[in-house]
Amino acid sequence: MSQHVLDTCIESNGNWLPITEFSVKSGMSLSTIRRKIKSNSIAYRLDKGKYFILFSNREVGDMRPVETRNALIPAKQPEKQPTSSRSNSDEDAFQMVSEAYEYALREKDERIKLLEQKTKDLEERLQELRLLVQVLEEKYEVRY
């Protein structure tokens, strides 16, 4: 039995969060989370085509992923606060999804800016190489 299967059997020791929610709470990028899933270095489960990551409170207020390499899952769990109304949890869920979406958009914008800069650098390099070829063709009176 693989390590992540063993960890998924211990559901009572943590919370299963969707990847986007996990990303927001941990500050980890979506691509890093997916790499960890692929390398089986993080506790996850696949439910109806969606990945869920196991979270656990290691210290009060400190949410961190439960990693399968060391499988540290605390024995003591914090008490759950009763919710006064369903609308609060809906608002919290909406806020969390909104934050995850904004985070993903910022990450994509940064990636686009990086790719645009690389494209600009490559275009400049290509122009320099074209100029060099032109100079060499003129110097040696050769045309390719």
Image (cartoon, rainbow, N blue to C red):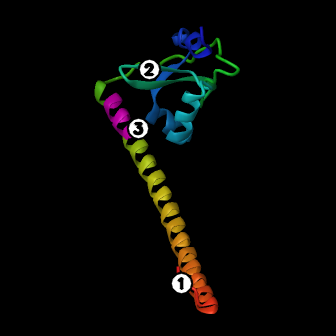
Q: Residue at x 58, y 86 (%)?
A: 142
> Residue 95 occupies which quadrant of the picture?
top left
Total of numbered circles in the picture?
A: 3
Residue 95 in magenta stretch? yes
Q: Disc 3 marks which residue?
A: 96
Q: Residue 50 at what x, y percent from top left?
A: 39, 25
Q: Residue at x 53, y 13 (%)?
A: 8
Dot 2: element: strand
The residue to which callout 2 is attached is 46
Residue 68: give x, y in percent of width and height: 64, 20
Horizontal side, residue 110 vs residue 128: left or right: left
Furthest residue in direction right, as rendered: 70
What stretch of residues is rendered in magenta?
Answer: 88-97
Name the residue beneath numbered marker 1.
143
What type is the residue that disc 1 sits on? Answer: Arg
Q: Where residue 24 appears, x then y in whole percent?
A: 49, 39
Residue 112: give x, y in percent of width and height: 46, 59
Q: Is residue 81 visible?
A: no
Viewer-side label of 3, 2: 2
| Camera sees residue 32 | yes
- The alpha-carbon separation of the residues under discs 1 and 3 comes to 62 Å
